[in-house]
Amino acid sequence: MVAAGRTVSDAAVALRGLRFGWPGAAQACVDIADFTLAAGERLFLHGPSGSGKTTLLSLIGGVLRADAGSLRVLGTDLVALSGPRRDRFRADHIGFIFQQFNLIPYLSAADNIALPCRFSPLRAQRAGDIGAAVARLAGHLDLPVDLLARPAAELSVGQQQRVAAARALIGAPALVVADEPTSALDAARQDAFLDLLLGECAAAGASLLFVSHDLRLAGRFDRCVALSNINATTEATA
Ligand SMILES: Nc1ncnc2c1ncn2[C@@H]1O[C@H](COP(=O)(O)OP(=O)(O)OP(=O)(O)O)[C@@H](O)[C@H]1O
């Protein structure tokens, strides 16, 4: 699916000859000749544990820097940016749901959700009334109002995962990257979560890169890719 006002040629993510190896590792962890995520596309990426899914997402999110190749995200060459500029770019344009959530434990759930708007004036501007945006996303994710005032450290793992999702979606980033975001949710909440995630991305014209082991979810996406089919360092077993 391609959002109105954009063409397929305006890729959300375009990487060519991308290589990354962890320091001290015998071989590269990521070695991808060619991969494109179209604007507005919702893509499901899967692969065995340890095959490099999180590492690839960290490169696309600008958390890590590639050793070689080209990586354009929303038209910006991330390999050419310094670490602080990649952080700025991520804050403005990418909603990232980390596998370990990365919530600030002593901040309330509401403050965690609003955090991207504190770091990025662009996200704050797009969110408009930040309190209302927090309440709307929390409501969609079935997070009760009284829970929003509690520190993130006091929430269950499934509640923390939903707070992390709301934080990624606030301020309508153009690219949403989600690393196994449904792993801690029961089946009913997985459905509600996917409804929200896919609905928010469609409404904002955002692209979605969604990593999961749960192939039952793949049918809800525009495309399903096995990392082993694009990453030269991954054995084609998944
Ligand atoms: N910080 C790190 N330092 C060194 N090696 C790392 C680091 N993080 C990951 N690796 C290595 O990179 C490889 C890929 O790890 P990665 O976390 O990207 O896999 P994954 O496909 O996301 O796995 P999972 O499905 O278990 O989350 C593994 O061999 C792992 O040991």
Image (cartoon, rainbow, N blue to C red):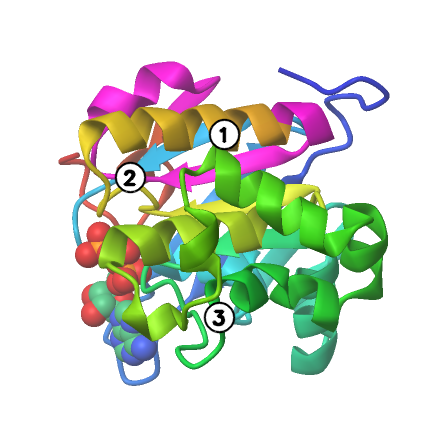
Instruction: Count residues near mark 2 (Cα–Cα under 10 Å), then give few for <14, some for 14-19, many for 20+.
Output: many
Q: Quadrant of the N terminus?
A: top right
The mark found on residue 196 in the picture is 1
**Residue 121 pos. (x, y %):** 83, 64
- Magenta-tinted stretch: 202-224
Toward the front, the furthest residue is 146
How far is disc 1 from disc 2 in space, using C-alphas?
17 Å
**154 to 179, vertically: above or below:** below
The mark found on residue 186 in the picture is none
**206 to 30, vertically: above or below:** above
**Residue 232 pos. (x, y %):** 33, 47
Q: Earlier in the sequence, mark 2 or mark 3?
A: 3
Q: In the depicted view, which residue is nearer to us: 213 or 200?
A: 200
How far is disc 3 from disc 1 in space, using C-alphas?
22 Å
Reading the image, the residue beneath label 2 is 212
Q: In the depicted view, which residue is nearer to us: 5 or 37?
A: 5
